[in-house]
């Protein structure tokens, strides 16, 4: 039976993917800060799900993550789905700090711990590290400077890790999954965003990208077109656009 750990599984995309794999009979380790939410999810598939309260911004995050791998009996897949971000035009340092601690420091910690696990268990079976980044990394977004920069960091980090795995002969697939807008608690809004996707629509596309070991996958095809065009916008024009993502 395959084993997957999802960090950031107490709500939104991570929660949906956790229940999808548990329903298929996978062993699923779920982690986030809200233990009560994790317990509710575990109760749905108590035989297949194990939980661990992990705050990726805390110093003991790696130790807790390694404990979860042990409790689960190994890890074939890591999905890093933890994340936060806000529009922050006033550049509030407290919001910036939370974003950086979760999307940069916590992300790096957990992804590195997964890489170290696969490196140490070489020759057992192929490892998989996938992270939900975002199309927001495509260009710096004025009202979400830290969030968009943190997502660009994740893109670059995963690319670097893929090269490092090749250099070091570590058998691990690295997947960078970049969704457009998904209707989750993160959006925290009653307004509808352009090309917004439901979780039910986005989750299978994210799962498919991970299982097919795509290096980079934009979710969905419409967002792939948007993101390709977005990259082509010259910087001189981009700075004049009042984009609010
Ligand atoms: N929704 C979108 O439109 C969209 C688009 C592109 C990319 N994404 C990305 O998708 C990922 C998932 O977001 P979502 O939309 O599903 O939002 P969400 O429902 O708010 O889920 C975020 C998850 O991250 C966990 N988390 C946050 N801070 C954490 C911390 N310090 N330690 C451990 N877990 C933490 C939360 O759990 P706790 O609060 O219980 O810790 C929650 O389970 C994020 O990386 C986000 O940037 C979202």
Image (cartoon, rainbow, N blue to C red):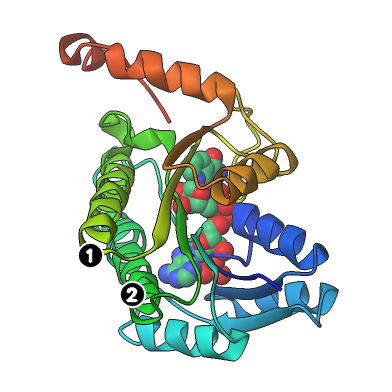
Foreground residue, 76 or 189?
A: 76
Mark with earlier residue (2, 1): 2
Q: Which mark is residue 122?
A: none
Q: Is residue 164 above or below residue 200?
A: below
Residue 187 is at least partly visible in this image: no
Element under label 2?
helix
Residue receiving disc 1: 168
**Mark 2 and mark 1: span between their CA atoms?**
9 Å
Residue receiving disc 2: 119
Foreground residue, 37 or 104?
A: 104
At 35% from the left and 70% from the top, the residue drawn is 115
Q: Is mark 1 within 8 Å of ligand 1?
A: no
Q: Position of residue 185 (x, y in %)?
A: 61, 51
Asked if disc 2 and disc 1 are in contact, CB closer than 8 Å, the reply is yes
At 33% from the left and 38% from the top, the residue drawn is 144
Q: Position of residue 209 (x, y in %)?
A: 56, 43
Question: Mark 2, residues whose alpha carbon is within 10 Å: few (<14), some, or many (≥20)?
Answer: some
């Amino acid at each position: 039976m395959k084993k997957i750990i999802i960090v950031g599984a107490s709500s939104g995309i991570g929660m949906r993917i956790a229940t999808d794999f548990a329903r298929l009979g996978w062993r699923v380790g779920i982690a986030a800060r809200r233990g009560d939410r994790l317990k509710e999810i575990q109760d749905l598939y108590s035989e297949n799900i194990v939980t661990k309260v992990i705050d990726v911004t805390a110093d003991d995050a790696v130790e807790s993550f390694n404990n979860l791998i042990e409790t689960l009996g190994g890890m074939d897949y890591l999905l890093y789905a933890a994340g936060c971000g806000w529009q922050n035009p006033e550049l509030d340092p407290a919001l910036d700090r939370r974003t950086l601690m979760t999307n940069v420091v916590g992300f790096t910690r957990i992804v590195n711990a997964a890489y170290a696990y696969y490196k140490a268990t070489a020759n057992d079976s192929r490892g998989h590290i996938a992270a939900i980044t975002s199309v927001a990394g495509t260009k710096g977004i004025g009202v979400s400077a830290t969030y968009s920069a943190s997502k660009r960091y994740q893109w670059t980090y995963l690319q670097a890790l893929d090269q490092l795995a090749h250099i070091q002969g570590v058998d691990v697939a690295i997947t960078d999954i970049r969704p457009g807008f998904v209707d989750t608690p993160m959006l925290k809004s009653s307004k509808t965003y352009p090309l917004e996707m439901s979780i039910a629509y986005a989750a299978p596309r994210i799962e498919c990208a991970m299982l097919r070991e795509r290096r980079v996958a934009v979710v969905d095809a419409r967002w792939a077109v948007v993101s390709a065009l977005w990259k082509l916008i010259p910087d001189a024009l981009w700075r004049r656009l009042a984009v609010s993502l």
